[in-house]
Amino acid sequence: MTFNDNSKLDTSRVSKRGKTGIAVGGGSAVVVIGLLLISQVLGVDLTGLAGGGSEGSSSSSEEALDCQTGADANARVDCLMVGASNSLDDYWATEAPALGVEYHSPAKFILFDGGVGTGCGQASSATGPFYCPSDEKIYVDTSFFDELRTRFGATGGTLSEMYVVAHEWGHHIQQVAGTFATTDRGDTGPTSDSVRTELQADCYAGAWAAAASQTEDANGTTFIQPITEAQIADALNAASAIGDDRIQQQGTGTVNPESWTHGSSEERQRWFTNGFRGGAGNCDTFSASAL
């Protein structure tokens, strides 16, 4: 995706944080997009987490980002993340009420380097991008985007990177909608609540992508130029690259659907497309008989 150069970015909810100390407390798990050091059993490595609870103390300060315009978003990945958050927030402020969801923005979007303390515990870059329901914050180490290309074979591109953010924002929608409270996200398998939760977040990402060129800054200037077929292909390629079946095949040479937590490559592409074509109202993965 390409931002309009003169669109204005709001950095108030996005910041950058360095490595942190150990977080302590007990209980909540992060919602992960399925990422760097993938477990051979579950398709997701959660070893970077050390138990949830209150946010750990930080050994480095939180930094504001110097991102002013869409031109900055086109030039720097940290500003691209700011632009993505602005567009997603504008989209969901209107779309969530249409779904019967009382929307509020994520508490914060944190860019981090190496490790980070969260309301869900301590996480490392190995955990990958994730949403923490306990503190309602999104956490992204942007080095994952390089890993997505070099390790998982994705084609890259700005929409594939913003798809990652849009997926995590979809988890925030599930949090405020009460979806997390009524599902078993510790379950695994091809029709599990865990898979249905992740595929719905993919669908929500597709719904946003279709409407992204209509989202506007505070002055009414659209953030993003019309999406291209090549950009859609990049997003679908990224969804395919992190399908459970592809990751398992790459890591072990075998595929075990009973351990799936995110869905197959084909399913992730299909549900992104369902959202792109039909909007967020077309994302009820929990009622679908076939995923």
Image (tube, rainbow, N blue to C red):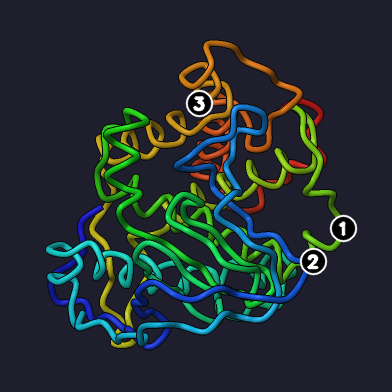
In the rendering, which numbered label is found on residue 5? none
Q: Quadrant of the C terminus?
A: top right
- 32 above or below 235? below
In the image, taking residue 266 as reference, residue 191 lies left or right, namely right
Q: Nearer the viewer, residue 37 or 144?
A: 37
Q: Residue at x 81, y 28 (%)?
A: 289
Q: Are marks 3 and 1 in contact (CB under 8 Å)?
A: no
Residue 194: percent from left, percent from top = 74, 43
Q: Which residue is mark 3?
A: 247
User: Considering the numbered disc 1 on the image, is that residue within a helix, a strand or a loop?
Assistant: helix
Quarter residue 68 falls in? bottom left
Q: Regarding mark 2 in the picture, which secondary structure is present there?
A: loop
Q: Residue at x 55, y 54 (%)?
A: 48
Which residue shows up at 59% across the image and 49% down it? 47
Foreground residue, 246 or 207? 246
User: Amino acid under label 3?
Assistant: Ile
Q: CA distance from mark 2 to mark 1?
A: 7 Å
| Mark nearer the N terminus (2 vs 3) | 2
Element under disc 3? helix
| Mark 1: amino acid | Thr
Q: Are marks 2 and 1 in contact (CB under 8 Å)?
A: yes
The residue wearing badge 2 is 178
How many marks do you count on the picture? Answer: 3
Percent position of residue 113, x then y: 34, 65
Numbered tag placed on residue 182 in the rendering: 1
Most foreground residue, 163 or 245? 245
Q: CA distance from mark 2 to mark 3?
A: 30 Å
